[in-house]
Amino acid sequence: QASQHTLSMAAPSLPPIAQMMDLILGHYRTAAISTAARLRLADHLATGPKTAAELASLSSTNPDSISRLARALASINVFAVEGDRFSLTPLGETIRVNVPGSMGHVAALMTDPVHWGGWSVFLDTVSAGNAQVKKVLGGDVWEFYKKHPEHELGFSNAMSSVSNIAIPAVLAGFDFSSSRTIVDVGGAHGALVASVLKEHKTPKGIVFDQPAVAAEAPKTIRSNFPADVTDRLSWVAGDFFAVGTIPVGDTYLLKHILHDWDDEHSIRILKAIRASMQPDSKLLIVELALPEQPAPSPAFWMDLNMMALVNGRERTASQYEALLQQAGLKTASFKAEPTSPVGLLVAVPV
């Protein structure tokens, strides 16, 4: 009989001490899932059930260690086990790579030196009031990634996975039918605006990002989108803090940018966009939204992650409105579900 046991995440039916023990052990689960993702165990199981020895051979690891790891993951329904053979569950399917909705690269990222290291000095961060990750990295996050391209690649892959999750919500939640020129500020490779152009055949798109990104991005996007999309897409290099450098458009996209920055820098970004907007332009901000009051939401934990790594933060709708007001903007609409990884805020000039 395949294991169907799932360890409760602090199930309310447990006594408080057992609930707290379950919560305390959370980072063990994170490390185990991340390791399985790095070893591509779910991908190896996608072709059928396998023994620990077979998985160890495929992943160049120790059979006993793999058996213990796989059994632990079976206890939380990531894998299933029958006899000495492990198989993939629907939950485990999500950490395969290169499949729709994959969280494999995101899981792998959680134990890279930046994320694991940043949380190892979280007490220092809370005490100091700013990120202390430099104590373990020798510099800030972005400096580390520049010096370690193998980890930068892992970060980029994870961010692409997050974007792939966000894109359907953006396409469903915002009306692009009247857009003529869409400017994706800090748009990296341009997957978001390219996806919009694929659905809407008349707008043109501009991806605005740092020179190094703008130079490399076209090759990536042209390998993933047809010519009728890429022919309407261009890249402009510049600094999104600098007024007068962001291209003019009627629709602006700002996805997962503001949460990297404190209020002062976020206002500078918004002011730079506002300076390029026309009276009828709209700005779509795509971010996690903190509930106004504590409630189950990934936003609270991502907020702490931003604190630990980059001095950024997630924000409530009212906190975003306060930023917008200081940049000459106001909220036109706001959509967010507490358990969704995507919130959509539409801002317009005051």
Image (cartoon, helix red, strand yellow):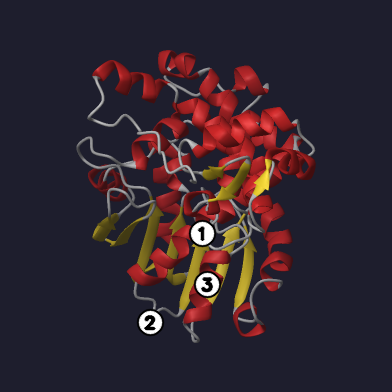
Residue 199, compared with residue 244, is above or below; it is below
Which numbered tag is attached to residue 195? 3
Nearest-to-viewer mark from 1 and 3: 1
Which element is circle 3 on?
Answer: helix
The 10 Å Cα crowd at callout 2, few under 14, some 14 to 19, many 20 or more, is few
Q: Which residue is mark 2?
A: 177
* Quarter occupied by residue 69: top right
Does the CB distance between marks 3 and 2 fall below 8 Å?
A: no
Sequence-first tag of 1 and 3: 1
Task: Give the number of the mark in front: 2 or 1.
Answer: 1
Q: CA distance from mark 2 to mark 1?
A: 26 Å
Task: Specify whether 334 is left or right of 205.
Answer: left
**Quarter of the image where the C terminus is located:** bottom left
Element type at mark 1: loop
Of residues 74 and 224, which is closer to you in this image?
Answer: 74
- Residue at (33% x, 68% y) in the render: 173
Q: Amino acid at mark 1?
A: Gly
* Residue at position x 71%, y 71% in the image: 223
Image coords of residue 212 (percent x, y):
71, 53
Q: State which tag comes first along the sequence, 2 or 1.
A: 1
Q: Which residue is mark 1?
A: 101
Q: Report, in whole angstroms, how far the alpha carbon at label 3 lies from the one at label 2.
A: 14 Å
> Measured from the top left, where is residue 125 in percent x and y?
47, 19
**SS class, disc 2:** loop
Which residue is pictured at 73% across the width and 32% down the height? 63
Choose between 270 and 254: the one closer to the eye: 254
Say left or right for 307 vs 132. Answer: left
